[in-house]
Image: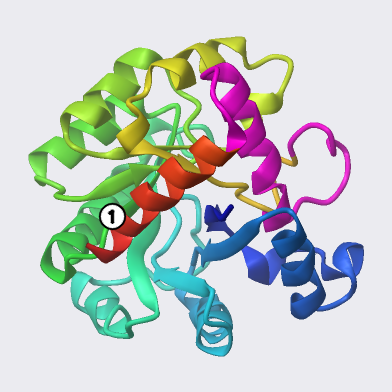
């Protein structure tokens, strides 16, 4: 069985909690059948740190992008994103999107402009977008539609069925994180049950959002196992089936 963590921040994981090294953390993940990883970039200042992980480990891939809440950083042009994306270890653009929790809608014009530049880079490069959206679901879908974003995953999905359906209608994938395991997330579990199997991905977003049964402890990509386990329970299937489906989906999205 192989499980892929489709969204993590390995460069930010507390390695001391997982043996003290990247190698020990990856070994722990492998013991839980988590064998490949997409380490996601959130600013260009740390791009080399993220990319170097992918260059050093054949089972780690990376992305290039600037997170919508990052302000004290370089704001990339489409051309700069495309230049960074030339490496074959870069398989995605992002994470990008909109976040009206941290920046109010009427003050977020710069976020929308940044988002559009990332979409253009994705369409030109052919590398899928990794979408972050928080309290901005309508504008997120609107801009993706206006810019005709060709390929994307809605990462760490925590919205309603209406938003999921809009993303699915645009041809995108839906990725679930440890939030699925939270006691308060029944409405999200109801959404997860309805997503077509061929559009599902799993992730940790580690070091954030540690799933049950490890809530309150550091998170790592190893715990994608528990996300897949919960998704299997929700959908009344086996974890091996979720592992197969989400691995096939990951490979189709990022490598086909």
The secondary element bearing badge 1 is classed as helix
Q: Can residue 178 be seen in this view?
A: no
> How dense is the environment of label 1, judged by Cα within 10 Å: few (below 14), some, or many (20 and up)?
few
Residue at (69%, 26%) from the top-left corner? 181
Residue 39 shows in the view: yes
The residue drawn where x is 9% and y is 45% is 148
Horizontal placement of 211 versus 19: left or right? left
Residue 47 painted magenta: no
* Colouring: rainbow
Residue 49, position as x, y percentages in the image = 58, 82
Stretch of the chain drawn in magenta: 211-239
Residue 87, percent from left and from top = 33, 85
Q: Which of 200 and 147 is in front in this view?
A: 200
Is residue 217 a member of the stretch shown in magenta? Answer: yes
Quarter that holds the C terminus: bottom left
Judged left or right of residue 211, residue 169 is: left
Q: Name the residue under label 1.
A: 252
Residue 17 lies, with reference to residue 213, above or below; the image says below
Which residue is drawn at the image coordinates 9% and 39% (left, top)? 146
Q: Where is residue 122 in the image (x, y as percent from the top left)?
A: 21, 62
- Judge whether 245 appears above or below 110 on screen: above
Q: In which quarter of the image is residue 95?
A: bottom left
Closer to the camera, 74 or 40?
40
Q: How many marks?
A: 1
Return the x and y of residue 228 as percentages of the image width and height. Answer: 60, 37
Vertical arrangement, residue 148 with respect to residue 11, above or below: above
Depth order, front residue of 97/20:
20
Q: Which residue is drawn at 64% across and 30% down?
A: 179
């Amino acid at each position: 069985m192989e499980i892929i963590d489709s969204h993590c921040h390995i460069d930010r994981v507390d390695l001391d909690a997982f043996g003290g090294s990247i190698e020990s953390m990856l070994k722990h993940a492998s013991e839980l059948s988590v064998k490949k990883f997409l380490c996601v970039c959130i600013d260009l200042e740390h791009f080399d740190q993220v990319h170097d992980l992918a260059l050093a480990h054949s089972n780690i891939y990376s992305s290039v992008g600037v997170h919508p809440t990052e302000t004290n950083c370089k704001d990339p042009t489409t051309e700069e994103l495309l230049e960074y994306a030339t490496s074959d270890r870069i398989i995605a653009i992002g994470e990008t999107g909109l976040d009206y929790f941290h920046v109010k809608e009427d003050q977020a014009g710069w976020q929308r402009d940044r988002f559009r530049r990332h979409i253009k880079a994705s369409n030109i490069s052919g590398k899928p977008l990794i979408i972050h959206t928080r309290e901005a679901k309508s504008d997120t879908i609107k801009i993706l539609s206006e810019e005709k974003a060709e390929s994307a995953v809605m990462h760490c999905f925590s919205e309603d069925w209406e938003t999921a359906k809009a993303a699915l209608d645009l041809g995108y994938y839906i990725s679930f994180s440890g939030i699925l395991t939270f006691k308060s997330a029944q409405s999200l579990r109801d959404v997860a049950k309805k997503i077509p199997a061929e559009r599902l991905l799993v992730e940790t977003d580690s070091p954030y959002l540690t799933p049950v049964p490890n809530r309150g402890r550091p998170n790592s990509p190893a715990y994608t196992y528990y996300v897949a386990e919960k998704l299997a329970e929700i959908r009344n299937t086996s974890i091996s089936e979720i592992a197969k489906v989400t691995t096939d989906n990951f490979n189709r999205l990022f490598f086909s």
